[in-house]
Structure formats: C-alpha cells, structure tokens
Image (cartoon, helix red, strand yellow):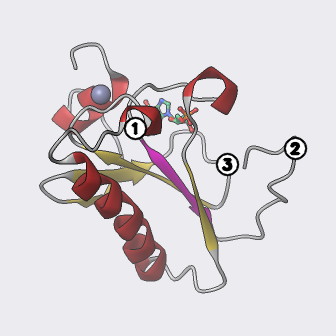
Amino acid sequence: MKDCLFCKIVKGEIPSERVYEDDDILAFKDIAPAAHVHILIIPKLHIDGADALSHDEPKHAEIAGNLIMTAGKLAHELGLKDGWRIVTNVLTHGGQTVRHLHFHLLGGEQLGDFGSKLLF
Ligand code: 5GP
Ligand code: ZN
C-alpha cells in the first residue's frame, strides 16, 4: 500500500534493522523498544490489522500462522528461554498506531503484568 510505513520498510524505502526475512514475512527491530528485545514481525503483504484477517482471503490463514511461528523461532534463536510475549494492537482502542498488521515480540527481561494500564 502506497503510503504505509511498514510497506515502505518491506520495500527498503525506509531503513530498518532486519532480523529475519522470508518470502512472506519480515521481522525488524522496533525503533522505540519497550523491552530489551522488541521485534516487529509483519507480513510483506499489506493487511490492515488482525481485524482485517479473513478466511475469504486465500493467504491470510497461512500468513497468520507464519507470523506466530516466526515469533517462536526468533524467540528461540535469540535465547529467550525464560519467556517472551507477542502482542498485536488493533485499531484505536487497541492502541494500533501503524495500520499494517504486526506482532510485537517482547522479551529479554521480566515483562510487566498485562494488567489494565500496561500495554507492554
Ligand atoms: P503499534 O503502536 O501500531 O502497535 O506499533 C507500531 C510500532 O512501530 C511502535 O512500537 C513503534 O515504535 C514502531 N515504529 C514506528 N515507526 C517505526 C519505524 O520507522 N521503524 C521501526 N523500526 N519501528 C517503527
Ligand atoms: Zn502496509
């Protein structure tokens, strides 16, 4: 999508610190880390957010599975043996600021309670 920040990162028009890439998925370091390890895992295909995933779209189920499995693979490779978290924010109430589906992979330290106030 033309004016999408993460589509520009996929195309290399905006630089990022890439940590993993395959045909469908890109993972790169968050520019403003909320934890010692904070990686964004995104589909290369533009999908607005988790709310836009649809069984009517042929690749969506595969992509959704790949995103989560990539999180596990990266967590393992990064040595997050004591645990980690994946979060996806959706729309305004969910705190989504970039409207291109992404999972935050967070870890490398004790993460806060996923309580009423803490997003991460
Ligand atoms: P959201 O708020 O939509 O759940 O997450 C968007 C994330 O993208 C935020 O954690 C923010 O720090 C990150 N972000 C925003 N702009 C950039 C950028 O240009 N490069 C990188 N690497 N991360 C970004
Ligand atoms: Zn996009």
Residue 104 lies within the magenta run: yes
Q: Is residue 108 above or below residue 103?
A: below
Earlier sequence position, callout 3 versus callout 1: 3
In space, the residues marked 2 and 1 are separated at their CA atoms by 23 Å
* Residue holding disc 3: 34
Q: Is residue 109 above or below residue 3?
A: below
* Residue holding disc 2: 116
**Going by the picture, which residue comes out furthest to the bottom?**
81
Left or right of 63, for residue 106? right
Left or right of 64, for residue 44? left
Left or right of 4, for residue 90? right
Q: Secondary structure at mark 3?
A: loop
Q: Is residue 112 above or below residue 79?
A: above
Mark yes or no: residue 14 visible. Answer: no
Instruction: Determine if the C-beta at disc 3 is less than 8 A from ligand 1.
Output: yes
Residue at 19% across, 39% down: 57
Q: Which residues are magenta?
A: 102-107
What is the x, y in percent for residue 5?
Answer: 35, 24
Instruction: Report the quarter where the N terminus lies.
Output: top left
